[in-house]
Structures are given as structure tokens and as C-alpha cells.
Amino acid sequence: MMKGRPAARAAVKRRVWVFLILAILLVALAVAAPALAPNDPNRTNSDFMKIAPCAQFPLGTDKLGRCVLSRVLMGARTSIFSSLCVVAASFAFGTVLGVLCGWYGGALDELVMRAVDILLAFPQMVLAIAVAGVLGGSLLNAMIAMGITGWTLYARLARSAVLTLKNEPFIAAEKLSGCGTPRLLCRHVLPNIFGPLLVNAATQIGTMMIGIAGLSFLGIGVTPPQAEWGSMINEARAYIQLAPWTVLAPGGAMLITVMIFNYLGDSVRDLMDVSGQSHE
Amino acid sequence: MKKTLALILALVMVLALCACGTASAPAATAAGGGTDQTVTLAESFAYPSLDAHKDYYGWYTSIYGMTETLFKMDDNSVAQPWLAESAESDGSTWTVTLRDGICFSNGKAVTADMVVKNLQRAAKENDRFAYLAGYEMKATGDKTLTITTPEVYPTLKNDLASPELAIMDLDDTTDFDKAPICTGPFVISSFEPEGTVKVVRNEKYWGGDVKLAGATFLYMQEDDPKQMAMQNGEIDGYTSVTAAALETYRKAPDTYKVSVVPATRLQFYALNENRLDAAVRQAINLTVDKNAIAKYLNGTVTAATGPFGTATAYGKVTVPAVDTAKAKSLLEADGYTLNANGIYEKGGKALSLNICYYAARSLDTLATLIQEQLKAIGIDSTLTVEEDPDGTYITTGDFDIALYCMIADKAGDPYYFVNAVLRQSSRWAIAGFHSDACEALINQLQYETDTAKRAELANQIVQLSIDDNAFGYVGLFNKTTVLRAGVTGCSETCPFDFYEIDANTSKTA
Amino acid sequence: MGRTIGKRLLQLIPVLLGLTLLVYALMDLAPGDPAAKRLQAQGVAVSEETLDAAREEMGLNRPFLVRYGDWLLGVLHGDLGTSYRDGLPVAAKLWKGLKNTLVLTLASLALSVAVSVPLGVYTAVRQNRAGDYVIRFLSFVGASMPNFLISVLLMYFFCIRVKIFPVIAKSSVQGLFLPALALAVPLMSRFVRQIRAEVLEELSKPYVAGARARGVKERYVLYKNVLHNTLSAVITIVGLSVGGLLGGSVVVETIFSWRGIGKLAMDSITARDYPVIQGFVLWMAVIFVAINLATDLAYRALDPRVDGLEGGR
């Protein structure tokens, strides 16, 4: 990794663009899903149960006779949007909190960091299961369950970045020249800490997707008949010998999507590195 | 004189021991002696103790072939003599006569006194049998005992078939949790709490020759490992076979013997009379297609008419056939019209129902299917899954359609279900089913001693609940068993879950 | 160092109190009755009187704070209570589950480290060549697959298709392999990339250039200096993963019927077995803090240049 070499920078930038476009394509696919789905994803059909891929059902049907392709497309909607939502919310909440803690310190800082300790002093998945179990099974509750620990990452990162930045000379200079705190935070602090936070956000999308799918797999996420990749895999795993496409289709879709977002996150991190931004 | 007395006493004791050792009971079939074969079966539960009186542990000691009760439920849900020969009632006093020659695995004879002590212990150890403590039980002879109940209690004989009321040797057992001394064809050889259980033949079994030399029970909760172990030849059989596995086994009928019998676990729904009027309820019941649902559930469920199997005397009720045209005309006559989305609406409000269920026993599939069927005729619905139905929708009554699953026929008698669900005082009354006629019939059922009359009353009661469109009885779970070819006698034809191996279980290599 | 340990342990107490109170309150708010769950385990419905009697017996009718206080008192005396489900002591159940999960965790970590360290070094040394790309691609695939999918596929291929392993393990090692592998795949994928990044960073440092200039053999440089400095990174990521593994293996434990603590927690939550849940929360919190502490200390021991920023990194 040679810092600052223009050729390397260009290559990395290209990679970021490639994966960004792929990610946008995925989102577009998710948005257009209802139009693209060949059949009604919820329509059960006792005459067509567990049929192998064919013309009418390009990816076959599941145990209730529903079109797998349609469900995978609708599942894309559910999975992608819910993870984006959770990540966006965690990002916003965690960053704001982290910046405030780093900047002001004191009692607020202590309180929030203790809360973070408490939340992280517990296996994430089990906490999510407990919350989802208590609130009941639904997509919203699954998102809340995953979000409860999701913001801590950003809070910690933002806080430590702000702590380092606080002592930089240019901040002192701005303060001296009469820059108000809100302006200072928005115009000078935030842009400088954005980089590493963004990287984490991109990678977290994949983790959130897997987390929500995991909860749905355990039966405490999405409610039927809503299509979601995790619950589809769960419903289909008993039939893996008789109808493997019911597992492989949502599994494959999930794999590709998460990979694209992970690659995106990775490329953004490379870009930050190459551009000389420290992310420690 | 003393010497002669001693001789006679000795002779009597020897004779008694002989009587215990040989099969004097006509029920035992001793077709060939014991073999060296053992079977390996997988179970979905494994408990931390073998104390049959506690919790549901008795179900498993019965499955393991270790414990027996006074009566046994047969394939038609009738209580048959087992350790007891008969039970006669006279008003509120029951007289139970024990069979001759029954003894524990240590050779000791089973006396009426020991039976009474067992029943009293069960009342003490088990919350669900605490009511026995209120009964006056005493041994009136070596082989007879009387039970006097405060009111007439016609179903005592059936209750005595509950596996928790196993008869154990309370005097000689030192460790109830790990080594209880019981009467069954097998005795414990190694016990891993919540793990693997191994039993071996009871050499002193009162019921004759025991074919198997022993058995191993593995604890496997998940369905996939059970199926794979079966296919790999690692186990000889298991119950609660899933629909997917059934399909796989049916493809190789020479290797696997699949057995499907309607059992006692009922899937049903309650329609909230406080929210849905008669027309809507009737429309719903005319739309839900139980046969289609059974088809989707692929062999694991039999479509039901009432809460009890149609083979039982008290399962004879009639349900109108599925008629979606009539359902639609009923809704329209009630003032509903189809809107642009194809959903019925009245007064600007679309007919959208809240179907509540919990994720167990295929209720999630059931909910999805009912939703689809209703949608097809123009009734919209949302599904609400709760983790705990008893703490949520059944207590609050916040539902339009509430799905539930429970054992309807606990012991070969209809009163249990009727009392738990259809009575005014039951928690299901929150669904709004009120019928004085029904209540009167239930009160009659409670004290009716004639079995045929009981069946007739039950049929009338259930029919009332059907006619009022208060409930819909969707399906009865099948007891699905798969056994390796050559293994027989694992209670695969008996609808009750708490029997598995016995003296006649055999395996031909 | 002693001050840090002391400070951390002291901070642990309010965390534990807060956590256990929170969880107890959560469980209380949740619908669901432990008495009903126990008595209706096989689907046989029981009467209200029976349920009431059971609730009385289990002490469930007492007010929330009384029950919490009672539990707390018990904990201070070293008694975690008995399970609502089967009356067995909570500590014994947790210990059994924890042992099994620890075995699984250690096995999967060992497997991951054994595979990812050589692979990570390899891809760094052979940067941007074919081998690098292939391994990096595979690591992305591995990191992107949910562990339940991996478990389902592994079970299918190894038990049915290829039949290497029996479904019912004959010995613990045999039964351990598949679940450990299922857990190891995402770990390996992450580790490989992180080790690669660390090694690359080390290789670009001046001292390496200096050693090369002096004619020191590449392999010597690699083993003696680079790996040593990478070790601290390995320790950090291992430490960070242990926590997640200890609790997050619920799905894998369920699919492979591995009686670990994650599965125990899940089953207890479903059965509303409060004493076990509380005990689990307590133990896990202590373990997590201990692991974080150990990781931090090890990190600092290996790299004295770093001064620990509280809450940083």
C-alpha cells in the first residue's frame, strides 16, 4: 500500500465506483422488485409444491407452492431496506452521541460510556434474541433489537476521533477566531471523522443483514408470509434434500448482496488509507 | 407343629415367587423367547430425572418401557386393563382390582397398599395431580383398593392411565431420579440426565418374555439430525417425523416403514364473537379449507371435523362443507361490498382481520394458509405472532382469529377438552361463546357415568360450538413414526405420545 | 497495570447491577408465565387453580423488587438459585453449558488461527498475485455467509452427501468438528484479511527495508520481526472474537445439537426461566469484561508503545 501514489489512488477510486454502482443496482432491484417479480410472492399453490426451476417458476417453488424467485426479489426489499435503515439510524445516533461525549466529556461522557459497556458486556445475538423475544416477532422489533447494540460502534469511534482532534492546532485556531461550537462541530470536526465511520457503516450493512436474517431464521424476526431471506432459509432447510433450490436461492442472494456491501466497505477503507487519512 | 408351619410358609413363599416369575396374565404374548437384539431410538425430549411422578417425566419412563400404570390407552382411546384388571364405580366410590401376579423388577409383588401410596405420592409431587390428595384412597385387600371422590367422577379410570401415575416400589427405591424400581419390561442400565438413556431387559418381568435385550434412547431435539441419522443407519426409528422427512422415507419403502395415525394434538382457532358478527364468522368457517391445509402439511396433520378423532365415539360431529360462494353471499347479505382491491368493506371500512398465533407446531404455516384462503374470497388479514399465547392474546382477547394447539384428548374422554375450552368459566370464554344450553350439557357431562351417554353429550356440545361458528377445528396432528424395516411394536399405531417400547417390541436383523 | 485492573473491576460492579436489573425488568415485562410454561410443556392444558398453586410455589406472585432483591441476596451468598424448568441448580446448568461452549469456541479459534495466519502471511507476501486474489475472494465469501447457512450446508454435505461424519458423534472430537468449522469459516475470513493488512503494514516499515538492504534473508525478516509485531493484532482480534463466539453461537449450537450456553440461554428465554437467564447474564458480563481486560493487557504487554485510551480503538 503506497500512500499517495496517483496510480494507486485511481485504481482504488475505480474499485469504489464499481462497487458503489453494484450496490446502487441492488437497491434499485429491491425498489423495482414488485414490478420484476414474475408471480405473486405470497400466492400458495397446492398443485405446484416444491417444483424444480422451470419456465413458469424460474427458481422453482417452495413447500407451499410459492414462487421462489418472486420471494427472493421481495426478500431483497425487506433485507436491504431494513439493514440500511438500521445502519443509518445507528450511524446518526451513535455519531452524534460520540461527538458530544468526546467534545464535552464530563458526566455525559461517563454515563454514555457506561451504557456502552453494559450493552457490549453481553453477547450481541443473545441480547437481540432477548429483546425480540420480549417485544414479539416482527421486522420492526428485529431492527430495534439489532440497533440496540449497533450504535455503540459509531459512538466509540466518533468519541476517540474527536478526542484526538480536539487538541489539534487548527481547532484551537478556529476557536480563537470566534467560531461557535455548533459550527465548529459541523464544519470542522465531523468531516474529519467521517471517513472511518463511513467504512464501518458499509461493513455494518452486511452484519445487520445477517443479524436480521439470523433472527428471522430463529423465528423471532419477520412474520410470515413476508418474504425475507433468513426466514426463507429456515423454512426451507428441512427440504434441502428434496428441493435444494429453496435454500440455495435465498442463500445465494444473501451471499452476493452481503459480499457487494463488504467489498464496498473494503474499497472505501482502501480509499481512506490511500488518501492519507488515519483511521486509528 | 412349628416345623410344619414353617414348611407350609416356605412352600407358600416359593409358590408366590413362582407365580411372580411365570406369566399368569393372559395378555402377554410370548411368541418365542428373548433375543439379543437392541434398538436405538431418537427422542425429542430428555428429562433430568426418572422420577415418574414428577412433571412430565412419567411420559418418558413409559416410553423407555420402564414404568406401567393401572390402565393403558389402546389404539381406539379406550382404557384397557394393565396393572389393574378392572375398575368399577358405585356412586362416588371406585373399586380397583389389581391383576394377579404383577411384581416389580426386583421380584417383589405389587400390593394394593403400594398402589395407594404411589397415587398419594404423585398427588404430592405433581401439581397436575394434586387433586388426588382430596380423594380418600385405601387398600381393602391385597389386590383391591377403593377411591372415594367428593363428587361423582366418571373419568377416574381414564385418569389412572396417565403415565405420571406409574406404580413404583416406594419402599426399596433409594434413588428415584436415577434408579427407580418399577414394573415394566425394561430396567434402567445407564442414565444421563437430559442425555442418552439405556435400558436392558427386565428378567423378572411379570408379563412374560421380553423380546428385546435392551434399548438406547438418544436425545435429539432438531429434525434434521434425526433424519440424517436415520438415513445413515445410526438410529432405528423415531416419532414426530416431519412432512419433509416423510416424503423422503416414502421413496424407499423397503428400507423404512412409515406409520401415520391421527393422534390427539389439535390445531384449532377461536373466532372472536365480540368483534365478528355471525355472518362473518359463518363466512370464515365456510372458507377455511381444512383438507387443503392438510394437504400442505403433507401427512403430518389429518383434517378435523371436531376436536376428537372421527374414530372415537365422541368424535361424531358434522361440519358444513367448504362453500366459498355461499360465504361471499353471506357477507354481501350482511352489507359488505367488494372494493377496488377485491376486499369486502362495509361503511367505508375494509374487512381486515387480525389472526394471532404462536410459532410452534406448524401454526405459522396454518396462519399463512388461512390468510391466503380468506384473501381469495375477499377478506383481508394481518398475522400477529406472539411468543406466548397464554400471556397475550388468549388473556386479553385481542384477536379476531386466535390459533392454538393443544392435546384435546388427554385420556380417552371428551370432558377434559370441553371443560378447558367450551365452558363459561374457561379462559376461552373471552372469545365470546355463550350458550346456556351448552353449559347445561357440560354440567351433565361432568357427572354422567355411562360411557355411551358421555359420547352423545360430547357430540352435542361440540356441535353447538360448531353451529355457533365460535370455533374452527382445523386438524389433528398425526403421530408419525418411522422405523427401520424389521423393527416392529413401537406403539406406532397408538395415538398417544407416551408409549413406545414394550415387551413385544422386536427387531429382526 | 494493577491500577487498570483494579479500576476495571470496580467499574464492573455498577455495570453488573445495571445489566441484571435491566434484564430482570425486561423479562418481567415480557408476556409469558414460567409456571404455565413448565406445566404445559407437553401441550396438556391445566386449570387456573393448578397454575395459581404453582405460581405461589415458585414465588412468582411477589412484587418485582422483592424477587430481584431476593435473587441479589442469593448471589452475594454465592447461590444462583434453581431453574424454574427442572429445579436443578442454575450454576451447575450454566457451568455445563459454558464448558461445552468453551470447547467449541477454543476449537473454532484454534482452527481459525491455524488456517488464517499462514494464509494471511502468504497473501501479504504474494500481494496482488493470483493466489492473493483467490484467497481474498474466498475470504469475502466466507465473511458474507450467515453462520446458519454455513451450518445447514455443512451438515448436508458432510453427513449426507459425503458421509465422512456420523450424525451422532461417537467421540467428542468427531462431534466437535462440524460446528467448530461452521463457526470458524467467518472468523477465518476476517482474520485472513486483517492479518494480511497488518503484515503489509509491517513490511512497508523502514526497519524491514533496512534489514533487506543489509542482506538479511526474507524469511528471517518475516519470522523474527514481522510476525512478532503482528502477534499483537492477532491477539486483539482473537480477544474481540471470543466474546462474540461465547454468546453468538446459538444458531450453530441449535443446528448441531451442541449443548452449549448459547442454546441454554435461548431455551431459557423461551421458557421464561428467569433464574437461569439472570445467572447467564451475570456470568457473561463478568466473562466479557475479563476477556476485554485480558486482551487489553496482553496488547499492552506486547506493544508498550501503545497507551490505552479508555474506550478508544
Image: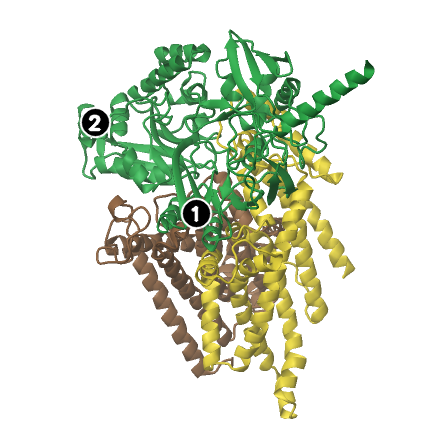
Chain colours: A brown, B green, C yellow
Task: State the quadrant of the C terminus of chain A.
Answer: bottom right
Name the side, left or right, on which B482 lies relative to A31: right
Chain hosting mark 2: B
Position of B280 relative to C203 (above/below): above
Specify the quadrant of the image occupied by residue C62.
top right
Q: How many marks?
A: 2
Helix, strand or loop at label 2? It is helix
Specify the quadrant of the image occupied by residue B457.
top left
Q: Kindly identify which residue carries mark 2.
A: B331
Q: Nearer the viewer, residue B399 or B169?
A: B169
Which of pointers 2 and 1 lies earlier in the amino acid sequence? Answer: 2
State yes or no: discs 2 and 1 in contact (Cβ < 8 Å): no
Residue type of the residue flagged with mark 2:
Leu
Q: Is residue C307 among what the camera can see?
A: no
How far apart marks 2 and 1 lie (CA) works out to 53 Å
Image coordinates for residue B7, horizontal then vertical, percent? 77, 20
Could you say which disc has been placed on residue A69 in the image? Answer: none
Q: Residues within 10 Å of mark 1 (few under 14, many from 20)?
A: some
Q: Nearer the viewer, residue B189 or C175?
A: B189
Residue type of the residue flagged with mark 1:
Ala
Position of A95 relative to C111 (above/below): above
Position of B27 relative to A139 (above/below): above
Residue lying at 52% horizontally and 44% vertically, measured from the top left:
B41
Q: Residues within 10 Å of mark 2 (few under 14, many from 20)?
A: many
Image coordinates for residue B372, horizontal then vertical, percent? 28, 39
Q: Kindly identify which residue carries mark 1.
A: B485
* Front label number (2 vs 1): 1
Name the side, left or right, on which B248 lies relative to B410: left
Q: Is residue A41 among what the camera can see?
A: yes
